[in-house]
């Protein structure tokens, strides 16, 4: 099986047959085009890239580095046993390799834990904590853009989850760029057109330090279950992922424009007036229920 | 298992536990509310109900009759061996029961057949033929509304098929009501909030004459395959069907407003200027390839 651009052996067959060099070229071009098409950032921006140690965010950071962008990394140590510290090591290695500043914060420094909170499953608590801390860290440290490594299957499975729960507000926000507003820092998703396989390939051929463990809490997680069902549909009907992403870019839904209020505890954005935000509720819970 | 409204035995458990009487009440109320909410038609309209002999359209016709609407039926005999004539008999029985006029047309009268046309699979050819003939019959006979028995799972699977093929124009048109325009007669889908199981139950408890054969051509049909996958997802994550329908009602997509042109052969609506419509192409094909 040969590369479609030269005589060398192809190392990937889908979406396109490429040899190592042409795959890297393709990957970097697609990333650059995505960033420019959506005006995600330019070289004057102060960019923060959220990294987890996994293949997706490690590939993103490395590719941005190859493209010549200046940025810093943010690793949130979620303090998940047999997992988080190992990921942290991989992220440190990566940032040493690309010679960029890596910021590391720990959930316990903010008084929270990745554990069930009343009826809320652990993965949902983790999502709130990560979103809150990424944004807060970016805001407090003067970053103008926060880049996350959400991939095409991530976005498509979020769409199905939002669709099923009737959360139209969340669907409207599923865009490659969410402009900043008040204490919300601009958020961008440069890997929106990339599959997990493409990121895996990119990380492997560049020998990136990547944490290959799966999160020990992720089994049976709703998003993973939905993602697997969609993978099945996509296998039979190629194109579902791709087309859903383009669909999400084009739809408008008439939803009430959400006001953004400030949490009465921490001052960071929340959806209702005079309330404690979800993050502070989680914090309150753990301060009352120390285990 | 008791009805939630009385002490009688429930005959259905999902979406709600009802006895026979309360299920009929629920079914008719939901149908009436749907028609009124979307202003599908009023009693002054000249209504044509497309019927196939199956549980969905038979339930629709019978329920509209119980609600006091005046309408006529249209049965298109697709001339599918071991199938269409049997369905026709059931439709005739039903219309005798409700004492309403039934119009019957046959595809051969219009020079077409439900068979593969070059690359187009049989089910796709059948769809074009049905849509064209329903609309043409309604228009030629002065009907102001055409009602079809599309159900919730039908619409959801169309959505996924349109999503996957990137057909945003078709998604925009997936509304409970499509207003008439030129030779396009207004189209309404009163069963948009009904599941197949609800229609089956309604047809069974009213002893409606229903053709229980599955179309012999339907096996492996893309829509059925997709519908089954979505049923699987809905089983694990209750709510997908319902929420998708509400989502479709609310989205707007910026697509070019499609001009409607007239076919240069038959004069009925088509999407491009100076062309022969899909129906006439099918007809041309069979006139050149009589088997």
Image (spheres, coloured by chain):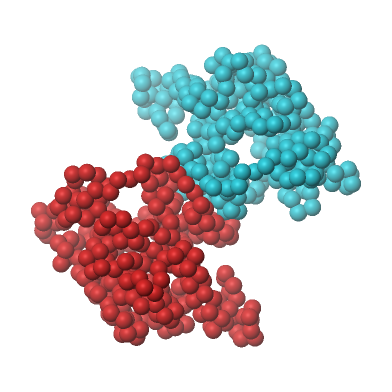
Chain colours: A red, B cyan
Frontmost residue, A79 versus B284: B284
> Looking at the rendering, which quadrant does residue A207 occupy?
bottom left
Residue B211 image position (x, y, % from top left): 66, 30
Frontmost residue, A137 versus B93: A137
Residue A8 image position (x, y, % from top left): 61, 86
Numbered label tally: 0
Name the residue: 84% across, 46% down: B285
The correct choice, above or below, for B53 with respect to A212 in the image is above
Name the residue: 34% across, 75% down: A71
> Looking at the rendering, which quadrant does residue A12 occupy?
bottom right
Residue B111 seen in the current view: yes
The correct choice, above or below, for A240 with respect to B152 in the image is below
Side (left or right) of A217 relative to B189? left
Q: Quadrant of the N terminus of chain A?
A: bottom right
Name the residue: 64% across, 84% down: A6
Name the residue: 48% across, 53% down: A248
Residue B244 seen in the current view: no
Side (left or right) of A126 relative to B165? left
Frontmost residue, A264 versus B235: A264
Side (left or right) of B21 relative to B7? right
Residue B84 image position (x, y, % from top left): 74, 33
Residue B65 image position (x, y, % from top left): 59, 17
Q: Quadrant of the C terminus of chain A?
A: bottom left
């Amino acid at each position: 099986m040969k590369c479609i651009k030269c005589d060398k052996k192809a190392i990937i067959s889908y979406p396109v047959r490429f040899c190592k060099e042409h795959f890297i070229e393709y990957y970097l071009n697609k990333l650059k085009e995505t960033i420019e098409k959506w005006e995600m950032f330019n070289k004057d921006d102060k960019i923060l890239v959220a990294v987890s140690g996994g293949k997706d965010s490690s590939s993103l950071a490395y590719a941005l580095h190859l493209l010549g962008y200046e940025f810093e990394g943010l690793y949130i140590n979620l303090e998940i046993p047999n997992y988080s510290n190992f990921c942290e090591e991989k992220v440190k290695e990566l940032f040493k390799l690309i010679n960029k500043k890596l910021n590391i914060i720990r959930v316990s420094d903010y008084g929270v834990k990745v554990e069930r909170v009343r009826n809320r499953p652990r993965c949902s608590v983790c999502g709130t904590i990560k979103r809150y801390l990424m944004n807060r860290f970016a805001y407090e440290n003067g970053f103008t853009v926060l880049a996350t490594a959400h991939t095409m299957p991530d976005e498509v499975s979020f769409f199905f989850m939002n669709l099923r729960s009737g959360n139209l507000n969340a669907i409207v926000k599923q865009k490659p760029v969410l402009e900043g507003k008040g204490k919300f820092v601009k958020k961008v998703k440069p890997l929106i057109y990339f599959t997990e396989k493409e990121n895996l390939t990119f990380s492997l051929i560049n020998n990136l330090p990547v944490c290959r463990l799966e999160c020990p809490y992720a089994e049976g997680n709703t998003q993973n279950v939905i993602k697997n069902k969609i993978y099945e549909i996509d296998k039979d009907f190629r194109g579902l992922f791709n087309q859903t992403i383009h669909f999400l870019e084009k739809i408008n839904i008439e939803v009430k424009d959400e006001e953004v209020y400030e949490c009465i505890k921490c001052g960071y954005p929340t959806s209702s007036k005079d309330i404690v935000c979800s993050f502070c509720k989680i914090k309150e819970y753990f301060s009352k229920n120390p285990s």
